[in-house]
Image (cartoon, rainbow, N blue to C red):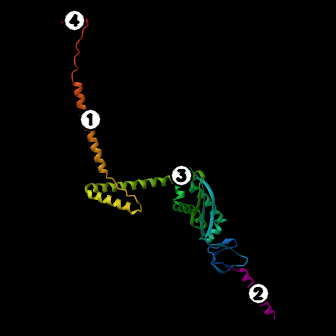
Amino acid sequence: MEGTVVAVVAVGLLLLVLKSGMRVVNQVERGVVFRFGKALPSHRQPGITFLVPFADRMRKVNVQVVTMPVPTQEGITRDNVSVKVDAVVYFRVTDPVRAAIEVQDYTFAVGQVAQSSLRSIIGKSDLDDLLSDRERLHEGLALMIDSPAAGWGIHIDRVEIKDVQLPESLKRSMSRQAEAERERRARVITADGEFQAAQQLANASRIMSDTPEAMQLRLLQTVVEVAAEKNSTLVMPFPVELLRYFDRATARIDADLRTARVPAQTRTEAEPRPVEQETGGPESAERP
């Protein structure tokens, strides 16, 4: 009877010890075991694990990807523009033992490194790079943050700049610049269209000048287009060549008239004036 009681007590103590040393590690965690204060070189995998009672202590480290926003950082770019930039960092733990030993709080440490790296990137970049060439800045930020984080057992998956806040005066200046650029492009396109249209018209005029029948056909086509509208007025185009003929004829007549006037005036000026006879007084009149 006493032996049975002792066996039952022994089994109960054994179960109690086993229960006190049994731990469950979740799938998203890894267990770092400290035996008498010293970390074991290997971490515990997910599932049920057993610890030495009163000797082992286990610390669980999450190995999921952590999304950490970087607070807005204000800085001056390389081209002397004051901006405010915020970002987001994606990182995860690759070495749970080093993450638990090398740094006290790896999340806080990564956040501080990300803030300082973001301010450094702002000072080294131009405003145009912050607005357009963000992929290169993302790679530079990830490299700057990953350099110290690698020693803590942390891997930086990605760093992205979320927003760039500009001064209101600069926004207005950029808007005016964009409007001026669009207006310049519109004028260039319009001028190019006019140039091409002028070239085609010049080619068409040369063809019509070589072929008079083409001009007559174009005239008839214009009459048909005007007559297609339901109106009672028919507009007949007057040939410009006829007007030019009258203009040349008028100029020729004016030239002939001017030529005819010039010889008449010349002859009038060339004729000698009649010499007036001197008339004397009463004495000369009495002479025979």
Is the residue 4 above or below the residue 155 in the image?
A: below
Q: Position of residue 72 (x, y in %)?
A: 63, 58
Who's the residue at 64% across and 63% down the image?
109
Amino acid beneath label 1: Arg
Please identify, in this view, whether the residue under mark 2 or under mark 1 is nearer the observer. 1
Amino acid beneath label 4: Glu
Provide the residue designation for mark 4. 286
Provide the residue designation for mark 3. 176
Cα gap from disc 2 to disc 1, whole angstroms:
144 Å
Our reading of the magenta stretch's main secondary structure is helix
Q: Is residue 284 left or right of residue 135?
A: left
Cα gap from disc 2 to disc 4, whole angstroms:
192 Å
* Residue closest to the eye, 49 or 85: 85
Q: Is residue 223 visible?
A: yes
Provide the residue designation for mark 2. 12
- Magenta residues? 1-23
Q: Secondary structure at mark 3?
A: helix
Is the residue 152 above or below the residue 206 in the image?
A: below
Cβ–Cβ under 8 Å for marks 4 and 1 = no
Please identify, in this view, whether the residue under mark 2 or under mark 4 is nearer the observer. 4
Q: Secondary structure at mark 4?
A: helix
Provide the residue designation for mark 1. 258
The picture quadrant where one finds residue 225 is bottom left
102 inside magenta stretch: no
Please identify, in this view, whether the residue under mark 3 or under mark 1 is nearer the observer. 1
Please identify, in this view, whether the residue under mark 2 or under mark 3 is nearer the observer. 3
Cα gap from disc 2 to disc 3, whole angstroms:
84 Å
